[in-house]
Each structure stands twice: as structure tokens, then as C-alpha cells.
Amino acid sequence: MKKIKRNGFALLAVVILLFTACNNSKNNNEMETNNKEINQIFPKGDKINNNYFSGTAWLQMLVTDKENFDLTIGNVIFEPGVRNNWHLHPGGQILLCTKGQGYYQEKGKPIQLLNVGDVVEIHADVVHWHGATPDSEFEHIAISPQSHKGAVVWMEPVTDEEYNSYSSK
């Protein structure tokens, strides 16, 4: 009798393992399809329709309750080659780079290459711009703290000469 229970248990374990393996294979295929379709953490957001970007970019606001949090957080996606104008933030800004490659430049300094995982701490009133490299879409989370100090101050567009001045040296 004891032997039958073990064999029954072994058979049940094998059936469960096979079912799990088949089910995981199906789920993995579904996940791969979904990743190809979505492949991003946050929704793409709305196309930015203003004159402060050199091309197509999208914005998904993530936190907008300035009154309780004194900050805003948005996810920004730039198409390859797109950048924003020179600008500053009275309360500073933090960029968390999450996808692709981008550029960041402060007025009077060389362009910095940004990669996934980079964090850029921009102090209050520092004039700068950021955007995608010519060959890569670029995505970052933009955190604007101390919103009580005022909204972004937009300035002139970044020229092609300025944008193309990146040197990997």
C-alpha cells in the first residue's frame, strides 16, 4: 500500500510539473509579445504640442499634486534627434534616465552623454537642455522639486551647431 501512494504521489508531481512547464511556456510567449508591444513602464502620454521641443516628444505626468508634494514628476520620451530648448527650473530638476541614450548640457559646458541608469541633478536656475542622441529614442523621468518657486522658464532653441558639438573624447 505504501508503494502505491508513493507512485501516485510521483505521478501527481510529474503531472503538476508538466502542467506548470506548459503553462509557463505559454505565459512567457504572451509576455514576450506584450513586451514587444508595450516595452515601457509608463504610458507614452500625450504628444507635446509647443514650440519648446525641436521635434516629436511625449509627456505622461505621474505626480501633479504640487500643493501636497511641492513637486511634479513626468515621464518624457524624445524621438531620435529631438531636444528641448534651453531652459531653467527655479526649484531645480532631477532626471532619471530610463531608456535609450540622451544628451544633457549646461550653458557654457560640454554636452554629457546620458545612458540608462544615469541620474542628473540640476540645481535651481541652472540653464540647460536635454534630449535624445541622433540615433536613439530617449526616455527619462523628470522630477521638478520646490514647485512653489515657479514653473520652468523656457528660452531659445538649441542650435544644430550646439546639438552637434558632442565629442566622445
Image (spheres, rainbow, N blue to C red):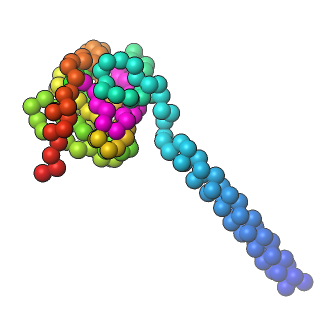
**Residue at x 59%, y 50% (from the top left corner):** 33
Q: Give, as a single range, the part of the protein colored magenta.
A: 70-85
Q: Position of residue 42 (x, y in %)?
A: 48, 36
Q: Is residue 82 left or right of residue 166?
A: right
Quarter of the image that includes the N terminus:
bottom right
**Relative to 33, is 93 above or below?**
above
Which of the pair 108/135 is nearer the observer?
135
Is residue 123 something that shows in the picture?
Answer: no
**Relative to 14, is 89 above or below?**
above
Q: Position of residue 103 (x, y in %)?
A: 25, 39
Q: Is residue 16 left or right of residue 34?
A: right
**Residue at x 71%, y 64% (from the top left corner):** 22
Q: Is residue 93 left or right of residue 42?
A: left
Q: Position of residue 135 (x, y in %)?
A: 32, 44
Please tell me whether residue 19 belongs to the stretch shown in magenta: no
Is residue 108 something that shows in the picture?
Answer: yes
**Residue at x 11%, y 35% (from the top left corner):** 109
**Image quarter of residue 78:** top left
Please tell me whether residue 73 belongs to the stretch shown in magenta: yes
Q: Position of residue 143 (x, y in %)?
A: 33, 29
